[in-house]
Image: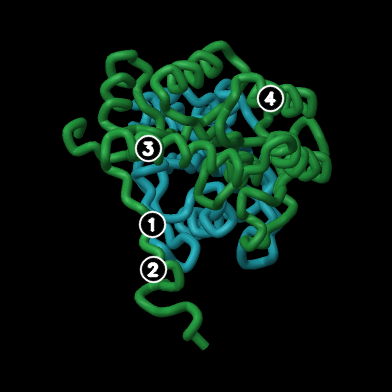
Amino acid sequence: MIPLKKKWVSHTIEDKDEVLDLAAQAGAWYVYQAVFDRSDYIRNRIKQYHDYGIGVEGTILLGLDNQTEDDIKRLIDFLLEINLDLAEFTVLAPFPHTKAYSDLLKQGRIFDHDWDHYNAGKVVYHPKHMTAGRLQELYHYAWDTFYKDEPQTQKMFNLLATVIQREQEDGTYKQRRRDLLDQSFGKNINEVA
Amino acid sequence: MEINPEFNRYMDRYFDYKGQWESPSKCGLKIVKRKDGKTLAIATEIYRQNPGTPVTEWCAPLASQILSEVGENPENFIFVEHTPDLKSKLSFYEETFDLVSFDWDGTKYENPQWKRLSREQVDNLMEE
């Protein structure tokens, strides 16, 4: 892919230096990486991506049975400390037909069966180490705290600016087509009733 | 994810049932006629080999269907749910057994309640 000079995003990339080096040369500029604890493994993983110029959006699942309130707060501090580029927080959504749903059902911990609430942002079960209400508060606390000093749009812009700079350097940058600004699915959005 | 072959100790055959929205569903099944005259049914979740509703989510209708098939009285029927060890790195895929108790409404089971059992407790249930 290197000669094609494409720029792409992906899920995790193997943590071998030679693979990351080739991925970066081939155009990887952003990955989606699960961050599940505050281990050196995660710290090094993020640093390794950054060393190759690859941005990282972390996906962070809150409300697991091994997490206390203190764990969640420390995890958010950790994300800021390791300079994660973007973070997406979710609460555990025990979707039907998953082991999580079966386990929580057996334990009598699911209190909300309104599927509209199974959106990974609403707590529908009793967490092990805190109340459902407290986990809901921590979910909002996580978003607010991570993006307190620099909003999500700014952080995303930082990543985009980096890739645009690379495209300008290798001559692949194309300006956005202004004539398509008002177009959606082939129609002018200003004319849609 | 393959089923641990050891689970055959708790499964003699597959059992087909109608799951949610009558979806074709399948579990492992072992029926034990106990010395005290009661019938023990062990229903095993077979994960990817089950094309329909998981055992846990459908255990009351499933137990009712098995009860009907074995022709037992509800008060002489013991239902155990089994999830086999999938040899996964994820701890929640370890082997578990749960004794499931129900309310009987005169025609079918409802309101399942689960109580975790050890393998030894299940073995004892099979031999009583």
Instruction: Kindly identify which chain the residue marked by label 3 belongs to.
Output: A
Drawn colour of chain B? cyan
Tell me the tag on residue A10. 3
Q: Nearer the viewer, mark 3 or mark 2?
A: 2
Q: Earlier in the sequence, mark 2 or mark 4?
A: 4
Tell me the tag on residue A176. 1
Depth check: B118 or A122 in front? A122
Q: Is residue A96 left or right of residue A143?
A: left
Drawn colour of chain A? green
Q: Is residue A153 visible?
A: yes
Q: Badge 1: how crowded within 10 Å, few (<14), some, or many (20+)?
A: few
Outermost residue toward the top? A40
| Residue at 66%, 25% in the rendered image | A80
Q: CA distance from mark 4 to mark 3?
A: 24 Å
Depth check: B58 or A14 in front? A14
Q: Nearer the viewer, mark 1 or mark 3?
A: 1
* Residue type indicated by callout 4: Leu
